[in-house]
Amino acid sequence: MAGEQLESTRSALREAVAQAERAAELARLLDAAQAKIAEAERATAELRGVQERLNQTEERLEAVQTAEEKLRRDLAEQRYQAEVAKWKLSSVQVARWSRLGDAIKTGKSNPVRLARGLRGVAKPVKRPVAPKRQPVPNKVADRQAPGASFQATTSVRTVGGKSVKLKPFRVPTGPNTRPHLTVAVVAEPHAEALLRYEWRQTTGFTPHDFPRVLAAEIPHLLLVESVTEGPWAEELREPGEGLHALLSWCAERGIRTVFWHTRGEADRFVAAARLFEHIVSALPASVGAWGAALASQEPPPGRRAPSLGLLPFAVQPRVHNPLPLAGDRFDRVLTLDELLPGHLSYPDVLTSYRWPKAVYCPPGTPAWRMGELAACGTPIAASRPGDAAPDPGATPPAAGAAAEAGTAADGAEARRAHLALRQAYASGTMSQKVDDLLDAVGLPSARATLNISVIMIDRGDLDHTLAQVAPQKGVVQLVLLTDAENAAERARAAMPEGVEVMVRRAGPGLTIGGQLNRALDLCQGDLVAVMDARDVYGEHYLADLTRAFLFTTADIVGKAAFYAHLSDVAATLLRQPAAEYSYLPEIAGATLLARRTVLRGLGFADVSEGWDEVLMRQCRTDGIKVFSADRFGYVCRRDGDRWLLGSAQLVEYGPAEPHALV
């Protein structure tokens, strides 16, 4: 019994000693952890102090730069005033009365010298040129944040060892689609170009200065792309203090946060993306990987898992549009590698898009790249340059046949390019994609609309009149002036549901201009179109024409280049083919599409013939911009017109619709 008690006591002692050792170890670990916590707190305090000193230093640097800029301006002004004083003195010295006084003074005791001096005074002397105030070099602007300047930097391209000089495409600075919305964006140049016109955009902030930069205009949304370069790249590869601080700053102010995956494997960015409220991807194939990555780990307590969606690349009308470069296109089909060498910045890429006759895109080219090319009006070649070489044994065509074949080929190429452009926009613009994003994150996506009111004066064939306007897209109102029987019922039956139809008598005592003014007072759409019931309009006519308001600053859009058909000679003509996509003094009145407020301010002249010419003269007087769009979608039909015959080129003898309606 005593032995058992002794053994039990020993066992209890051993267990107590082991527990004591474990307790000691725990105490040691606790002391070490507390020491580390204290060290971390000290490091955090030091970091906070360093951050405060850095902010103070940046503020002092900014003040010094401001003072330096003021001193530079003052110095430049003093130099300019000194040059002005020298110029005034030189002007006085070369003035005839001054030289006459000098001649009299030096020759008063010497008649020969006086005569010589007076002859010198009689000779004209070139007066000094007044100095001009030179712009002050802004060294502070040279150190502006990344993304603040977004223009092409090179105007030379090299193809086949030869250099070609281009006039760069100028990237527009606005306007913005949603001026009521401010968004802070971390993005590379391509994505920045797609987004910068969708809202007021803040860029160029870093992990160190974002509190100061973003505080100037608190954003409604933070959008961070999966960048691989720049000050945020390291933070996204492995979330650091800067990213955590940025997201905490946004959370404190109720700012929504979105991570945008545009490149690379999803696994590389999962750790950073989890910290955001929403994740969107430009790559539909990566959505499954993102879903699996988010499902593999529960969110921290008190946080919801990020939502998952799509934000693909799309056409941005402000930069992806058919506005041409100065001069003709480079008359050669280029490969994509020749067109876009790796050293080009994205603004330079926008210049290259508009440069060649056509581009061959190899298999595997991203759809967004081909869409951007097509939106810039550049045809996509079906084969690699040189693959379809001509047969050396073939008999060359006669000169006339060759010219006719070349014209037909150019027309077919232009139609294909126009169809590709239309398809690129129909696939969705960046504004439409951003609408979906804003709706998903709970922000207002409202933006200006381009609804259309159409004015038509019936010419006696109401069925033909209605057949021109019924297929058009974007029409919310038809104002029809006609004397036909049952016109209102026939018009409502022909027009799509939801289109308001207003029918009024034409009024026999009114001129065409007077009738148009009467109809204009009834219009309610954002845009007003005037269509001529004698002519033919394709089903995409208004949709194509409205597109110009997305990438121009014009208030009136129409066509100065268009096809015409003269029935007396059965001839199809093409008027002013070089007038496509350009600001011009005038367009055809039957193709008029204008902003309602601007058109009401101008009004129509009370005449029947030449009302459109009077309107265009008024536009020139008032400084209203007029833009000529493409040649397609419209045929001007006349029995005979000498003016058209003298101002257009013959396409063929036959109908115009196969050429114009694409």
Image (cartoon, rainbow, N blue to C red):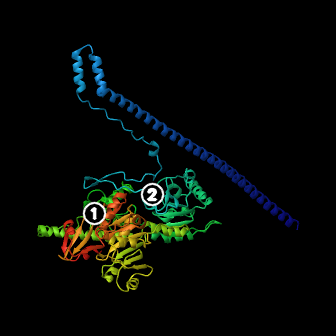
Q: Split into 4 quadrants, where in the image is the N terminus?
A: bottom right
Q: Is residue 46 above or below residue 100?
A: below
The residue identified by callout 2 is 188
The residue identified by callout 1 is 579
Q: Is residue 156 visible to us here?
A: yes
Residue found 80% across the figure and 63% down from its top: 11
Residue 370 % position (x, y): 35, 66
Q: Is residue 463 above or below residue 159?
A: below
In the depicted view, which residue is nearer to us: 382 or 584? 584
Residue 136 % position (x, y): 42, 40
Residue found 51% across the figure and 69% down from its top: 290
In the depicted view, which residue is nearer to us: 486 or 89? 486
* Amino acid type assigned to the residue bearing label 1 in the image: Ala
Q: Earlier in the sequence, mark 1 or mark 2?
A: 2
Residue 18 % position (x, y): 76, 59
The quarter of the picture where residue 106 lies is: top left
Residue 108 % position (x, y): 27, 15
Q: Is residue 394 left or right of residue 627?
A: left
* Amino acid type assigned to the residue bearing label 2 in the image: Glu
Residue count near mark 2 (Cα–Cα under 10 Å), binned few <14, some 14–19, many ≥20: some
Q: Split into 4 quadrants, where in the image is the C terminus?
A: bottom left
Furthest residue toward right = 2
Furthest residue toward front = 509
Q: Secondary structure at mark 2?
A: loop
